[in-house]
Image: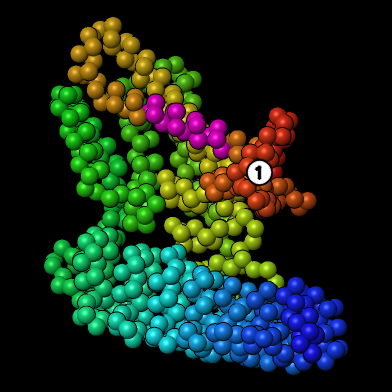
Amino acid sequence: MEEATAKAVEACQRGSLEALEAALAEGVVPDACDVDGCSLLHWAAINNRIPIVRRLLELGANPNIVGGLLVSSPLHWAARVGHVSSSALLIKAGAVCNVRDTQGYTPIHLAVQSNQPTLVAYLLEKFDYCKDITDNSGMTPAMWAAYRTFGMFPIRIIVRSGADLNAHEHLSGNTALHIATQERNYCSIRELLLGDADVSRRNKQQETPLDIARNMRNQKLIDMIEEAARAQGMVPNIWCNRLPWKKIKHYGGFFLPGSVLGITALLFLSLHYGIAAFILLTAILVSQCFIRFDIYSTTSSLIPIGICVAEPICMMITWYLYQHLFVSWWLQVIFVISLLILFGSLLRIVVSDPGVIPRNREAHTDFVEAIENCDRVNYCFTCWVDKPQGAKHCSICDRCVKDFDHHCPWLHQCISIRNLRLFLVFVACVAISAGIYSCACVLFLIDEFRRLEIDGVLKHHSWLLFTLVVAFFHVIMLSALFFNQCLQISEKVMTIDRVRGRARSYAHSHAHSYSHQSQSVSDESTSTRSAHEGITMSTRLHNLLEFCFTSPS
């Protein structure tokens, strides 16, 4: 019988249903265990042998049988390696999630420790008690996520499930926020604070999370926790902190670039060019040293689009004051038309839908059904939508977008197949208008050089020279961006995948709609390079024409 049991164990490990049936025919019972006390179901679950697991459960195998050195259940084994399908079969057959092994861990603790967000989400949907279940040391899933995982998931799933974020573990009396602060886990801290974790809780050393951050001298942590403490009324609010600074920074950012350009113009027009340049450079250096600015930050997200609006307006005003008399009428017409198209395309991109995937009220139920049917899912656990191929969750816009190409901070909008052509029109118009503006500046300055010396030109037209440098910079950068996008289109590559180092093609379907087709590659950079080396010029032209004249879905 021992030999037959060994054959059954090997069959479960290898996934051979025929060998298992043969062993069962020899008298091996479905709950048979090897010499270490590990059952057939343990070995089938850890190797994700779905037909074997299903067959053993049909024959009456106990889904909660414990065994092995850690005295754990098959669900423990499946959760440790993140096998969602095996876990779903076991749970449907009656497996529970409150069994602890000798280390004190339940399956959800193991799923969190191994960073398996899909399995964590499934366990939380099936067992409500999972969100606050503790191990032998009092560690909850939220605490383990704060300690072991450093991304948005699974901590976001746990927080949004309604878990108790203020529980204390037994050893040091730390909460999840204490642990995240000690580990410098910024993602977990952000999610815990958004979940209204109490910043005033003290551990056995009478330390709050803010005390820990101050002891570590980590200014970023201090700022994050102090802001939450003020919102919770734990830190005294001076009058200036009572102002809605986030909204002021957010909406004021749109008008900041125009104000800066206006002040710069006044400096160059009213002061000596040397003094104005010195003040401008000093201001830039000081701002770089003391102001932390991130164009992808949600609090600074309107500054780039403010630049996109302010610079063309600045060009138009300067054009009217200086250059329009020094260029031919047809060039002026092209300049005006390009500016009109620029503003029109900008407005359409900003107000149009880039392809946002709508959120489904029944998403949680659909998710559980898909998992239990062993369907392949690619869920976004922020939006709770099943993302199709090519879709991505944009962390700036906080939404999932179909056929995602990239998020453009300069337009405060996601760029996808749906609005990529408009984006290229906008980029081309910026490059064309900046190019015409640069030519007009050069013609004007050549005429002025004939009348004035170099010092005179610098004295009287320093602002114009400044705008010429800015415009020429835009010509170079926007032209490079335009041709890079065209190159990607000719190769059927998306920006997000080029950044990630793999090629994902989007192709024209029979229904005249674009759909992404993922390329499975082992060595991403090598396969991307080899895939594009064979693209002929005729293929590139065909891809460009297809993109230009085929309507996206």
At a point 65% along the width and 58% down the height, the residue shown is 389
SS assignment for the magenta stretch, majority: helix
Q: Amino acid at mark 1?
A: Ser
State the image quarter where residue 212 is shown: bottom left
Q: Is residue 513 above or below residue 99?
A: above
| Rendered location of residue 94, percent (x, y) | 65, 91
Q: Is residue 118 above or below residue 430?
A: below
Report the quarter where the N terminus lies: bottom right
Residue nearest the viewer, comparing 551 with 420: 420
State the image quarter where residue 50 is shown: bottom right
| Rendered location of residue 53, percent (x, y) | 73, 82
Q: Is residue 551 rendered to the left or right of residue 290?
A: right
Residue nearest the viewer, comparing 313 with 298: 298
At a point 41% along the width and 31% down the height, the residue shown is 474
At a point 45% along the width and 28% down the height, the residue shown is 476
Q: Is residue 191 rendered to the left or right of residue 530?
A: left
State the residue position of label 1.
527
Determine if the magenta segment contains residue 341: no
| Rendered location of residue 139, percent (x, y) | 40, 82
Helix, strand or loop under label 1: helix
Q: Is residue 334 visible in the rendered structure shown here?
A: yes
Q: Is residue 49 visible in the rendered structure shown here?
A: no
Magenta stretch in the rendered image: 471-485
Residue nearest the viewer, comparing 10 with 310: 10
Q: Residue furthest top?
A: 450
Q: Is residue 197 rendered to the left or right of residue 374?
A: left
What count of labels does the image hold?
A: 1
Q: Is residue 291 above or below residue 272?
A: below
Q: How is the image coloured?
A: rainbow
